Image: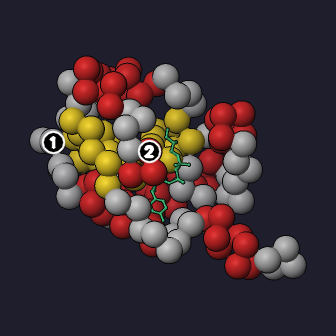
Amino acid sequence: MKRVITYGTFDLLHYGHINLLQRAKALGDYLVVALSTDEFNWNEKQKKCYFSYEERKRLLEAIRYVDLVIPEESWEQKKTDIHEYHIDTFVMGDDWKGKFDFLEKEGAEVVYLPRTPEISTTRIKEDLGPDS
Ligand code: C2G
């Protein structure tokens, strides 16, 4: 059983996220998604989510490619997650290319997948505008 992990905020879930999750799952048999908590998003990424952690978790758990959702509470937890969840492959979109190569030292394959270029949560918010 090949186990894969990926991390993210996944706010205003869109097909770019689904493309990533589908390709991540295709790299193994079991996909863990570490979902950024509201506190981590605000304190570390200055992101204010539209949906709460619990709402975002519920959405991810409804996706056929996702087997387990865990909280992402710190940048540092990736190293321990690799061991705690017996991860073979770590996956992120290529906007993070190179940033997590150090995880190879923990015994995980590190894979960066091309982002879906034309869609983003930021773009959705901009297109909907302030009055939406
Ligand atoms: N993504 C993508 N295509 C898009 C938008 C996002 O492939 N059009 C990917 C991102 O590259 C990322 C995942 O979907 O791998 C989740 O994206 P975000 O929710 O924006 O995650 P991010 O804020 O980058 O958080 O510790 C890592 C961070 O938690 C990643």
Say which of 76 and 61 sits in front.
76
Q: Identify whether 71 is placed above or below 83.
A: below
Would residue 50 be found to the left or right of residue 121 on screen?
A: right
Disc 1 residue type (three-letter): Lys
Q: Position of residue 130 (x, y in %)?
A: 85, 73
The percent coordinates of residue 84 (x first, y second) are: 32, 23
Residue 109 visible, this angle: yes
Name the amino acid type tagged 2: Trp
Which of the labelled discs sits on residue 96, or is there none? Answer: 2
Nearer the observer, 82 or 124 = 124
Work out whether residue 62 or residue 28 is closer to the camera in this orientation and state it. 28
Most foreground residue, 7 or 66: 7
Q: Is mark 2 within 8 Å of ligand 1?
A: yes
Badge 1 is on which residue? 2
Q: Give the quadrant of residue 106.
A: top left
**Count of residue discs:** 2
